[in-house]
Image (tube, rainbow, N blue to C red):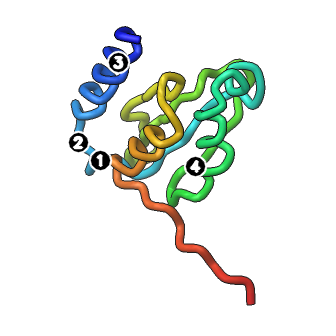
Amino acid sequence: MKLVIASICLFFVICAAYEDSDIVSARIETCRGCSLNRLPQVKSFVMDDAPKYDRVEVKFISGAPPELILLGEGDQELDRLPLANLSRDQCNELIESKGFTKQSQKSDL
């Protein structure tokens, strides 16, 4: 348990190491099956929540661990943040802390 808490603390320290204003978009890379199925909280975030955010793309790559990739101008990779040790709420808090907001819901007319 202490290792998980230490990992999460380190994760947020690393996140603060660059300017959030440089972030233009984000991509979540993960496998569709194996490792994601072992992480039900992260899977719920990836499948249900992440697609609702503006400027966030989900890309499924066989065997890839779940990561949030922050992108700058010209899709320049700014940072890769692992999601495996986070809860669904923590994933949402993380992406929102980077300036991403959920798309406004459109009503069917």
Question: Circle 4 is placed at which residue position?
Answer: 50
Q: Secondary structure at mark 2?
A: loop
Specify which label sits upstream in the sequence, 2 or 3: 3
Marks counted in the figure total 4
Instruction: Say which amino acid is labelled 2.
Output: Glu
| Label 2 – label 1 distance at C-alpha | 6 Å
| Picture quadrant of residue 52 | bottom right
- For discs 4 and 2, the disc positioned in front in the rendered view: 4
Instruction: Say which amino acid is labelled 1.
Output: Asp
Residue 77: % across, % down: 43, 34
In which quadrant will I find the N terminus?
A: top left
Cβ–Cβ under 8 Å for marks 2 and 1: yes
| Label 3 – label 4 distance at C-alpha | 24 Å
Instruction: Say which amino acid is labelled 3.
Output: Ile
- For discs 4 and 1, the disc positioned in front in the rendered view: 4
When the figure is inspected, residue 6 is found, relative to residue 12, above or below; the finding is above
Specify which label sits upstream in the sequence, 4 or 1: 1
Question: Circle 3 is placed at which residue position?
Answer: 5
Residue 7: % across, % down: 36, 16
Q: Secondary structure at mark 1?
A: helix
Specify which label sits upstream in the sequence, 4 or 2: 2
Cβ–Cβ under 8 Å for marks 2 and 3: no
Question: Circle 1 is placed at which residue position?
Answer: 22
Question: Circle 2 is placed at which residue position?
Answer: 19
